[in-house]
Image: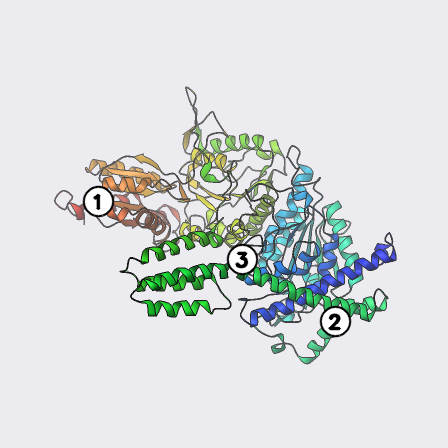
Amino acid sequence: MTGTETKQALSFTDFRTEVINDYKTAVISRECSLLGRREVLTGKAKFGIFGDGKELPQLAMAKAFKNGDFRSGYYRDQTFMMAIGQLTIQQFFAGLYGHPDLANEPMSAGRQMGGHFTTHSLDENGNWNNLTQQKNSSSDISPTAGQMPRLLGLAQASKIYRNVKGIDTEKFSVNGNEVAWGTIGNASTSEGLFFETINAAGVLQVPMVISVWDDDYGISVHARHQTTKENISEILKGFQRDEDAKGYEIIKVKGWDYAELIAAYERAGEIARTQHVPVLMHIYQLTQPQGHSTSGSHERYKNSDRLAWEGEFDCNAQMRKWILENTFATEEELEAIEQQAKADVLEGKKDAWAAYQDPIKAERDAFVTLLKDVAAKSDNKVFIDKHISSIATVKELMRKDLLVIARKVLRLVINEPVKESLVAWIKAYTDENQPKYSSHLYSQSDKNVLNAKEVLPEYGDNPEDADGRMIMRNNFDALFTKYPETLVFGEDVGNIGDVNQGLEGMQEKYGEFRVSDAGIREATILGQGIGMAMRGLRPIAEIQYLDYLLYALQIMSDDLATLHYRTAGRQKAPLIIRTRGHRLEGIWHSGSPMGMIINAIRGINVLVPRNMTKAAGFYNTLLECDEPALVVECLNGYRLKEKMPINLGEFKTPLGVVETLKEGTDITLVSYGSTLRLVEQAAKELQEAGIDAEVIDVQSLLPFDLSHDIVKSVAKTNRLLVIDEDVPGGASAYILQQVLDVQDAYKHLDSKPDTLAAKEHRPAYATDGDYFSKPSVEDIYEKVYAIMHEAMPAKYPKLY
């Protein structure tokens, strides 16, 4: 079926109007790319990466894209965003300039470079918009193929909404009819994340349409160096569904064939929407007229034959030819459209630049007035006047320019009374502008984790001593009943109830859609969670062991951790990541790379409970909040006995709150997780030697000790030791920085603050391997004893 045949219900006049409007959008988008490149080369913008050469397939995709659908895309999709009415010319250039005002630059408020697109899922207070009544785009990221795991989750949400009863779907789904549309460049299909997602979507059979924009290159590297057979659809033929097995529908279309593109996308959307079958769209014979980006020219790596072919088969040129051949417009009419597009784009660019510059110029004028007053009262007037002259003549102004001058002038008036007015301006200007670039790393809504209040576990008269795993299982049972939108998935999660039976019997009770097994594919397990959380579900993504989190760390760091920040608070994914770690024996199952993790995922809460009751309390807290979090359960705690609470699903462990497990007067010992058991034992043995140690459980690394209780302890003991099983300089260094730098505990120290960490290598296997690799009770005892010896050598003579 041709695109023309699909339009039989329209009159010729209506269809002609639609075609001409599409051509206008294509030409406007191309002009934005061309003028955008010039803005970078003239210095007004920092960097540019554009969608030229991909206009027609994006127009076709937009026609099949419906309200409620989601895009998870690639930084060249500007034509698509324009076609669905979510990107104007002025907004395009505002993004290029980095305008830090969401009203002018709604994609990221200047936090991402141009070409990265989004729509607003949340209102200004962090509440959900009705996603079924708008066309949605998840926020783009630059890492190649990084959009793929999230795409899987966006598609899976529709499957959950279609098959799980009892969820409030009003703002999120209409019977699971929504399609998740992905886009990716052909070279990026070489990434493992692409193949992992393709496989997972085929297994899950989710409504996903992934478009590969194939222009034969990855920057300067030809497809022969990227893809086997130079053809992604050819090598994925084995995924094609047939009568005997589920799989993909694979569709291959030339990127310059307007009519066939429309027909193909209509078919793809219908298959995915109605049948929940994933579709691969291989859009080939595309071009990239300006090369990869503003960093260089494609003439350096394309020969004359290729350049000539690209000139002829440019998709806009081919659409123009098709319009003329089918008499939808005359040459004169098309020239008029093209001239008007140039004028509109130029006007939009000017408006965007003025909107960006005018507020800063007004701030500059007020600042210059202040500087003149400062100069008039200063002995260094001649030098200040030079700064005034330099700032007054800057044409392409940035706020940085004002602060640089202000801080330089401050040095000139450091001993003069007039400095106070300048200091006040610097502080006020910084306070006003810093949030434009730094806000919304975490939620600022009334559902943020800091608003959650502690609820203590309650116990009956004769509380049962139960394995820690039973507390976890029974608490999950209460949560799945309380929150029908909650689901959990991961390796061995479903049938056997996770490797430690913390979910025993849950799949049988709640069904395979809510408690499900996943393949060995950590990155896309995370992606499932991100996408589903972006669509209003409350997923818990389980990564079997903490070591395995490294497979997913890039997704956590680049996508999940930055989502709320890079959308200036207009998208969120309150995903809970469940894992377990600490003290298991062997190189590959006992790592505790907490320093690596906490420094890679700022924007995600990191919780390290010492037992299963504390862990269950964290899950209870998080499901009432709207932020993502990582919960690291103690791997050796599932069989340890704890008292069974009677208020399962209700008691809450607060975030950012430490707990003092033992009070003392001589030294403060700070730790978390399984290592705390060793610290507590060492503290008992130290007591026998006359050393009274205070033991503090951090509980939450991100956020960290918001009430500054650790410094209160150090003020009492005047000594500090941080014990951790990460490598030296890992999480222990972070804790030390928080206590000494943020809490100013150095003021109270009588001895050098110290750390005790694991060895630099991975833990060797078996019990002796653990003993010689990670801190032991004896290590802790002797480290504390050495600190006390340095302070009171007569009372505590040397051990060695």
**Residue under numbered circle 3:** 110
Q: Give the percent coordinates (x, y) of residue 54.
A: 69, 64
* Amino acid bearing label 1: Tyr
Quadrant position of residue 370 = bottom left
Work out whether mark 2 precedes mark 3 in sequence or the reverse, and give the earlier one.
3
Looking at the image, which residue sits at the far left?
794
The image quarter in which residue 514 lies: top right
What colouring style does the render use? rainbow
For mark 2, give the secondary structure.
helix
Q: Which mark is residue 313?
A: 2
First-in-chain label (3 vs 1): 3
Question: Which residue is tagged 1?
Answer: 785
Please give the name of the residue rendered at 19% of the width and 37% of the height, measured from the top-left corner: 690
Q: Is residue 145 above or below residue 217?
A: above
Residue 37 occupies quadrant:
bottom right
x then y, percent, for residue 393: 47, 70
Residue type highlighted by circle 3: Gly
18, 781: nearer the viewer: 18
How many residues crowd mark 2 within 10 Å: few (<14), some (14–19), many (20+)? some
Q: Nearer the observer, disc 2 or disc 3?
A: 3
First along the sequence among labels 2 and 1: 2
